[in-house]
Amino acid sequence: MPPSADRPSELPDAGRVAAALVGAEGLIEWWSAAAEDLLGWEAGEVLGTPARRLLVRSAGTGGADTGWRPVRLSGRDRGTVDAWIAVVGGSRVGSSLVLAVSGAPSPSASAPVSVSVSAPADDGGDRDEHRDDEHRDQGRDQGEDRSGDIARALFTQDRIAVAEFDVHLRLVRSNEAFRALRPADAGSDWFLDLVGPGGGERIGQELARVVDSGRSMAGRNYRLGVSETGRTHSLAGFRISDRPGTTVGVAVMVVEGAWDLRSRRLVESYRRAFEIGSSLDVVTAARELVDLVVPALGDLGCVDFPDDVLQGRDPPLGYPGMRASRPRRVAVKSASGPWPTAMTQAGETVPIVEEHPQMAAVSVGGAFVLDPASGRALLSHDPRLIAQLMPQGMRTAVVCPLYHRSRLFGSLQLWRTDNPAPFDEDDLGLVQDLCDRAAVVLDNAHRYTREHSLVVALQRSLLPPAATRSAACETAGTYLPAGGSVSAGGDWFDTIALSSLRTALVVGDVIGHGLPATATMARLRTAVQTLADLDLPPDELLTRLDDLVRRMAAESEYPDTVGATCLFVVYDPVTGHCHMASAGHPPPALLLPGGTACHIPLTPGPPLGVGEHPFEVWSGALPPGSTLALYTDGLTGHDPTHGMSDLLTHLTEASRPERSLADIGTELVDRRPGFDGHPDDDVTLLIARTQAVPDENIRRWEYPADVTAVHTARADANAQLQAWGLEEQMFATELVVSELVTNAIRYAGGPIGLLLVRDHVLVCEVSDSSNTQPRLRRALNTDEGGRGLFLVAQLTNRWGSRYSAHGKTIWTEQNLP
């Protein structure tokens, strides 16, 4: 403590007199330059230490202890006070000095006392005449009692490790805290053999010097552990002497080093900072940030985001971005107990406070520290805002923006309530570094969230309705985009209405993720719909799709990244037959009405884009009420064999009669292997429950290649329509049947088949053995023919033709009321 006005004015002459200032707690608060010269101790070595550690008891004749010597000192304007005279020992210059302590007359006075030290005078005997034996004995007894109390307190407490060694450095006694430091596999001299960090001397050598020189040691750092992961502790040691002044040993105290605690906290915080944002989710990143700083740096912490960040939009530039959309609290943490109920909770919007000069730091990404007074001033002393934005018992706070690329992504607020230490420059620098790191992560997560949202929105816009119902089947589709750090992929499902009440079911999986995969998926889905509208069989459709994918790969800058798998299924509710082919896609799961579950024995062909490989077609009859499950590999996990087996079990358990297909699909997705809410691949599932057209709504005829068959066919069709009560459709149907049967007789030959099907539309089919494609053309006014298909197109809603193994079929559909 430097000289000040509080220093007593009655100090002795400073020429050869060493002077010190001792506070009310008995600690040296000031040490004169003469004391440094006379005693050899510099001020920095003694300031803040107990004055009594420099004192030794005086010895009388024959070496007998004469104790402390009381004297009566008189001073101008001070009155008469008691003081103690003793011999000072252990100075660096090796001299023994007489020390006089003067103090306030009242023992309860809190004023400091002055201590003057000078060389011993020749009239030491005269001073002995003032000795008071009774006072000496009483002071000695009290000192011995206090020393015993202190020793017992040191060895019975459990927070500071304390040990006593003899002059040969053999352990005499220790407390429980010291014994707890010993490694399990250490020897008897484990403590003395420890070496300081960086290859310093052994503790035993340090303590030996304390015994020899009497000079105490303090602030020595040692790693108390047999490996480099051991924690560093700070050691202090001092020599122990008995009442005659004979050295009997050395005492050691061990505390965990404050520097080591701070360094390990910094290292751990920086290490964990690199783990922020691994999920690329902004809310998760905010929670990871508060977990990082609480309780390492503060007792309470929270992160606020503007709604733009939460909704995947770019926040406006600069500080106004935080005020343009009201911030929302997204993450909170308390070091002890729950988050205070009076403060803004996670998920709630944060009140906007008035502008303040300190907020200017936020606009350029700077942090600032608040004490309770400045915090209340920042909140305009509004009790409501103070309760919402300041915790009870706040001692200090720091506000740090999450700022990157001139955009404010939010802010971190950190409070200390139990910890009385204010945030220092190191704390502020650490918080700033962590927030800068978190802001970069948030920027990446925000851009990922934005792209992911765009991809998912585009993906969902390209998919058909989740649920459809037709004469062939009822369907329900489920699409779950990839989560975590994986962008949405190119999975898709589709339900396509074909001719004559048939339905096509499609599931595909494009290689890769992100916008390129979604764009490829859109092209493939469009191509499948176009090819399906041509009524191509499944194997031919996949062959043409394979040609398209190979052309796309040839046009791509990265051809190896273009590819897909696809499963194409066609179900006919009139015949009950199903046809399917696969290009590298797993076969669908089938659950029959009786409860039997299996996978369709379909052999998948190569993925799309490989080329020059035919695709195998599986054909079979499915009874009404059968359930088909078409899926991508995201549903079966990384072990397809095990995942496909589990799928059959889950499909059987989930397919209860009272449950909807949507509920069944949700349960199957939830029970997929490794379900955690964030799949590492897109999950696509299309469930279809087959239906059949009743026999009474189906009527078939077959005619020879004879012109008289035209009249018979018209009569049969009219009679059946009348039986179904469809008299309004008789005129159009009669013309359609007449034209199609006539063309078949003229260009194809027999036999000729006629089919009428009644459902939500009236289907009329005419089949023949020819593979000639009918073509609609525009007839001239002078042409005698060529208007038949034109009339058919005008009288029906849809018409077309498809090929079979034995010829072709021309079909028409008319809407029914």
Image: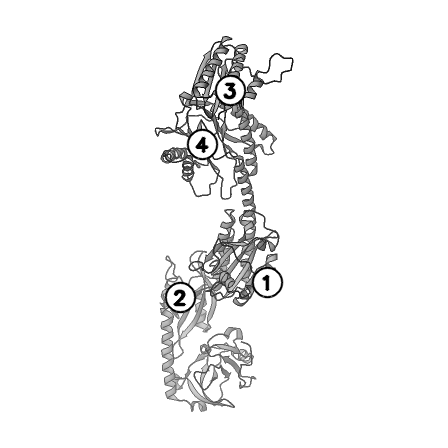
Is the residue under label 3 in contact with that under label 1 (CB below 8 Å)? no
Q: Which amino acid does label 4 sit on?
A: Thr
Of residue 186 and residue 439, the one placed in the foreground of this image is 439
Of residue 453 and residue 326, the one placed in the foreground of this image is 326
Of residue 215 and residue 764, the one placed in the foreground of this image is 764
SS category of the residue bearing label 2: loop
Image depth: mark 1 or mark 4 in front: 4
The CA distance from mark 2 to mark 1 is 42 Å
Residue 159 - label: 2
Q: Identify the residue under disc 4.
A: 475
Q: Identify the residue under disc 1.
A: 358
Judged from this view, the residue extending furthest toward the left is 594
Q: Residue 174 appears at what percent x and percent y?
A: 36, 67
The CA distance from mark 3 to mark 4 is 25 Å
The CA distance from mark 2 to mark 3 is 93 Å
| Of the image marks 3 and 4, the number of the one nearer the N terminus | 4
Q: Residue 630 appears at what percent x and percent y?
A: 45, 31
Determine crowd level at label 2: few under 14, some 14-19, many 20+ residues with C-alpha closer than 10 A: some
Task: Inspect this view and state whether residue 171 appears.
Answer: yes
SS category of the residue bearing label 4: strand
Q: Which amino acid does label 2 sit on?
A: Arg
| Of the image marks 1 and 4, the number of the one nearer the N terminus | 1
Determine crowd level at label 1: few under 14, some 14-19, many 20+ residues with C-alpha closer than 10 A: some
| Of the image marks 4 and 2, the number of the one nearer the N terminus | 2
The CA distance from mark 4 to mark 2 is 70 Å
The CA distance from mark 1 to mark 4 is 60 Å
Determine crowd level at label 4: few under 14, some 14-19, many 20+ residues with C-alpha closer than 10 A: many
Task: Inspect this view and state whether residue 64 appears.
Answer: no
Q: What residue type is labelled 3?
A: Trp
Q: Identify the residue under disc 3.
A: 811
Residue 647, compared with residue 765, is above or below; it is below
Of residue 642 and residue 598, the one placed in the foreground of this image is 598
